[in-house]
């Protein structure tokens, strides 16, 4: 089984910065993509940023130029550096890891429990 744990959320003022971290642990053979989604009450979860095992990245248009995703493959950890935060970035941020527990298993998406980010003065 694979566990995914986020950290780093909190309250920040507009134009401030936060760094989210997310570590995958457990029985892991390989991890493909890792990334972050956000969710606000009453709406579906939406992609913020993703990063492949080779470092290719993808961002939502709303965060391009402000957020940066990175990963440390040795630590099975992904980071989201969030700069120039806006009130509309307020949401619960969920981390995911697409991982295989063994060479014969299928790639499975594992989710963290979510971390609240609130941007407010």
Image (tube, helix red, strand yellow):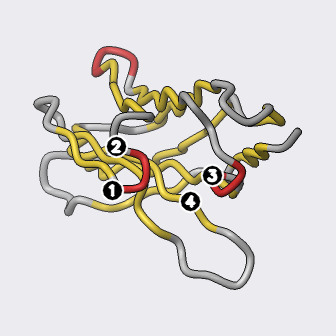
Q: Is the Cβ of the residue at disc 3 closer than 8 Å to that at disc 1?
A: no
Q: Which residue is mark 2?
A: 64
Please tell me which of labels 3 and 2 falls first in the chain: 2
Q: Does residue 87 lie above or below 42 as drawn?
A: above
Alpha-carbon distance for marks 3 and 4? Answer: 9 Å
Q: Is the Cβ of the residue at disc 3 closer than 8 Å to that at disc 4?
A: yes
Q: Which residue is mark 3?
A: 89
Q: Which residue is mark 4?
A: 38
Q: Is the Cβ of the residue at disc 2 closer than 8 Å to that at disc 4?
A: no
Question: As drawn, is 113 to the left or to the right of 70?
Answer: right
Q: Neighbour class for label 3 at 10 Å: few (<14), some, many (≥20)?
A: many
Q: Is the Cβ of the residue at disc 3 closer than 8 Å to that at disc 2?
A: no
Q: Please name whichever residue, 85 or 23, is drawn nearer the observer in this view of the structure.
A: 85
Alpha-carbon distance for marks 3 and 1? Answer: 13 Å
- Which numbered dot is residue 114? none
Q: Is the Cβ of the residue at disc 4 closer than 8 Å to that at disc 1?
A: no
Q: Which residue is mark 1?
A: 61
Mark 1, secondary structure of its residue: helix
Q: Point out the frontmost of discs 4 and 1.
A: 1
Q: Please name whichever residue, 93 or 27, is drawn nearer the observer in this view of the structure.
A: 93
x, y percentage for residue 106?
Answer: 20, 63
Q: Is the Cβ of the residue at disc 2 closer than 8 Å to that at disc 1?
A: yes
Please tell me which of labels 3 and 1 falls first in the chain: 1
Alpha-carbon distance for marks 2 and 4? Answer: 15 Å
Q: Please name whichever residue, 24 or 70, is drawn nearer the observer in this view of the structure.
A: 70
Q: Point out the frontmost of discs 2 and 4.
A: 2
């Amino acid at each position: 089984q694979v566990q995914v744990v986020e950290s780093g959320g909190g309250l920040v003022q507009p134009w401030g910065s936060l760094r989210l971290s997310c570590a995958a642990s457990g029985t892991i053979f390989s991890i493909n993509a890792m990334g972050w989604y956000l969710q606000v009450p009453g709406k579906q979860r939406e992609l913020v940023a993703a990063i492949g095992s080779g470092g290719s990245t993808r961002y939502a248009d709303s965060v391009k130029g402000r957020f940066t995703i990175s990963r440390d493959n040795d630590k099975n950890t992904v980071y989201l550096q969030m700069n120039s935060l806006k009130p509309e970035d307020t949401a619960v941020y969920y981390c995911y890891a697409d991982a295989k527990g063994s060479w014969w298993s299928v790639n499975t998406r594992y989710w963290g429990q979510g971390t609240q980010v609130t941007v407010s003065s």
